[in-house]
Image (cartoon, rainbow, N blue to C red):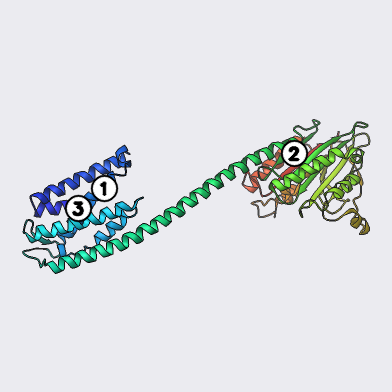
Amino acid sequence: MILFTIVVYNFKGILLILSTSYLVYSILWAIAVELEAPFIQYQNTRYIRITFDAFFYTMVIYITGGINSVLLLSYILFIMMASLYTTNRYGIYAIVICIIYYNAMLAMIYYTIIPSVNILANEIQSSVAITTTRVMFTNFILILVSVILHRITYRLYFKLNEKTNELQTERNVLKKWNELIEQDLNLARKIQNKLIPNKDPYPFIHSLYVPMEAVGGDFYDFIEFRESKDIGIFVSDVSGHGVHAAFITSMIKTLILQAGLIRNNPAELLRYLNTILYGITADNFITAFYGIYNPLNHSITYASAGHNPPYVISGKNIIQLNKSKGIPLALENNDYLFSRGKDYKNVTYSVNLDDRIVLYTDGLIEEHVDDDHYKNFGELMRQEILPYAQSYSSKEIIDTLYTSLKKKSGKEHFNDDVCIICMEIH
């Protein structure tokens, strides 16, 4: 617009017509781009664009001194931009049209068709030293530099475009892989949902499982016995997360189903699991707790493989079932454990009516909480929640723990899998 104003103020005739045409063209092109007109997508329209833009740069060079213009190298920048198009011919066309415009301008000045001007000097020049030598020299330099930079720019752009296409191809491959992985995770999630109980077996037992990822390494199961009314509760936690941990939980589920009468003895079941899992878990270990509740004498017989000891809420007392302290599964074989006196052992604990037993994995107690008084949720749970939960139902205890965990941690997704089981003693 500034250039157009200068031309209107100082010049008339064909220069004004050309300037007006360029101004109108620029406005129409901007409107077409804004409206996403179909014709601007055609590659041949770029020739039109280059033709008009080359005229604009020629006008700038003309009004700043012509052959003496300090902006003569603006042609080079324009040609480099034209070289960034998808084909080599646009840059070549830009070189040709610039040379034509430039020499036409010099000829018109030489034959006094248009006056010589330099707005930077704030004066109309009456004459300019346009000689054959100077014209040939400026043309030679302009063509030489333009061709060299055009080739460099186009080759760099071509290589960049190749790399971009390669990256896009790799991105598409990764996208397909991600889709396949997502499908596998969905399948693994469905399978794992089948492994854990889809409902609680009794109204006085409730459970909650929140995996950190799509699938998790926590596992629990309820075991019923044909020959008695005993209730077995198994809970385990595989080190690590994700699909490999979930795969190990599926192995545990299968082994428990195949254990037969071994399930009647918590310590024997842990030995059985350790025998098979040792050496096949790729350096992953498993903490596990297995307890069998006898409703006739109100006792629970349990064995632990390095798992977090459950809590018993008995009135205002909070008691931990921590007398059995075996090491996690799959770390050492049974012979080694027996020789070191670390074999899995059964412990029987008598409970009272209306007691509550709370089992959990470390994802619950190790979650960081935004509280200056406690290092983690385990401390807060033991000191502020469980002592006041003696009158809560098993479902209310789990709901309270989960709600408090979300509130105190300030998030919906936690740093580890979270599993909670609560049983009321009737």
Dot 1 falls on a residue whose secondary structure is helix
Question: In the image, what residue occupies the spot 17% across and 58% down?
Answer: 102
Foreground mark, 3 or 2? 3
What's under tag 2, amino acid-wise? Ile
Placement of the C terminus among the 4 image quadrants: top right
Kindly indicate the quadrant of the structure image that contains residue 232: top right
Q: Which of 315 and 91 is in front in this view?
A: 91
Q: Which of 203 and 238 is in front in this view?
A: 238
Numbered label attached to residue 47? 1
The image shows residue 397, relative to residue 380, as above or below, that is above
What residue did someone put label 2 on? 397
What's under tag 3, amino acid-wise? Phe
Dot 2 falls on a residue whose secondary structure is helix
What residue did someone put label 3 on? 55
Q: Are marks 3 and 2 in contact (CB under 8 Å)?
A: no
Find residue 52 and report its horizontal and vertical position in percent. 22, 49
CA distance separating discs 3 and 2: 80 Å
Question: In the image, what residue occupies the spot 33% across and 41% down?
Answer: 41
Q: In this view, does 47 lie to the left or right of 408?
A: left
Kindly indicate the quadrant of the structure image that contains residue 97: bottom left
Q: In this view, does 357 lie to the left or right of 120?
A: right
Crowding at mark 2 (Cα within 10 Å: few <14, some 14-19, many 20+)? many
Q: In this view, does 346 lie to the left or right of 368?
A: right
Mark 3 and mark 2 lie on one chain; the one further toward the N terminus is 3
CA distance separating discs 1 and 3: 12 Å
Crowding at mark 3 (Cα within 10 Å: few <14, some 14-19, many 20+)? many
Kindly indicate the quadrant of the structure image that contains residue 294: top right
